[in-house]
Image (spheres, rainbow, N blue to C red):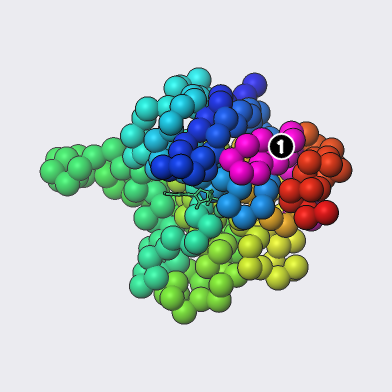
Amino acid sequence: MSLLKAEDIAVHFGGVKAVDGVSFEVDEGEVFAIIGPNGAGKSTIFNLISRIYTMTRGKITFDGTDITRLPSHKVAPLGIARTFQNIELFDHSTVLQNLLMGRHTHRSTNFVEDILFLPKVRREEREHRKRVEEVIEFLELEAYRGKMIAGLPYGVRKVVEIGRALAMGPKLILLDEPASGLSVEESQEVAFWIEDMRRDMGLTVLMVEHDMKLVSAVADRVLAVNNGRPLALGTPAEVQSDPHVQAAYLGT
Ligand code: ADP
Ligand code: MG
């Protein structure tokens, strides 16, 4: 069954057709990758799904709900979490604090209600901490939990960025270039985690990635885009050997 369905989505910025008629479906439990050269429109597709940008045309359905016109703050509570290509963490907060902030989409009460419904708030707080502890264990962040983001190596910050999204407890996680800037060993680790997210957490993964090795290792299906247009859709092997993809993406 498809969890996410994008139909003929497009967004134009003035004369720039950043995304111009892209359709795809991501099945539940699938790892689906979007590849393409720089400026192809990959991050923009994520911004359309998370409703940061409003579509010029097209339709997006998630888990049976039409989210095309939903405000962005209502998307995350439906079960869509994302990472950003440029890490978006609070530099002067700790790893633990950043992961707890990832939970704020689940708050069901406001400040006044907090006082009225203290037992409920305490129970929710316990649930937040439990989920965050699971994420810390899953991503092996134990040694960094109390450390300030600003002082951490790039590779660790990249993992915390994934953790912030995982802490939300999503059904679908959008990973924007999770391996960019990482060493070969770190990229391999990311590949293992993506596999585990699917297997142990039952997550569906939609990722944008340049690293074809990582894509071939983890993705069930790949969509290649260029200049906002779809080029090819299929297994990693099929897409890699597609002549249009080779011309556009591999520069051959
Ligand atoms: P990718 O992630 O594939 O490298 P992007 O999706 O970031 O590419 O960008 C695709 C194109 O859309 C680029 O030409 C970019 O300059 C343009 N673009 C993206 N967002 C905006 C925006 N908010 N305003 C104007 N142009 C944009
Ligand atoms: Mg991008």
Q: Which residues are magenta?
A: 213-233
Which residue lies most toward the bottom here? 151
* Of residues 82 and 200, the one drawn nearer to the viewer in this rendering: 82
Task: Give the image location of residue 213, x and y in percent.
Answer: 79, 55
- 180 in the magenta segment: no
The residue that mark 1 highlights is 231
Q: Residue at x 37, y 55 (%)?
A: 101
Residue 236 appears left or right of 231: right
What secondary structure is found at the residue carrying circle 1?
A: strand
> In terms of image quadrants, where is residue 219?
top right
Residue 244 appears left or right of 8: right
Residue 4 shows in the view: no
Q: Amino acid at mark 1?
A: Leu
Task: Give the image location of residue 80, x and y in percent.
Answer: 48, 38
State whether residue 38 is above or below residue 35. Answer: below
Q: Residue at x 29, y 47 (%)?
A: 122
Give the quarter of the figure containing the N terminus.
Answer: top right
Give the quarter of the figure containing the C terminus.
Answer: bottom right
Q: Residue at x 28, y 38 (%)?
A: 108
Residue 201 appears left or right of 169: right
- 214 in the magenta segment: yes
Q: Residue at x 42, y 63 (%)?
A: 89
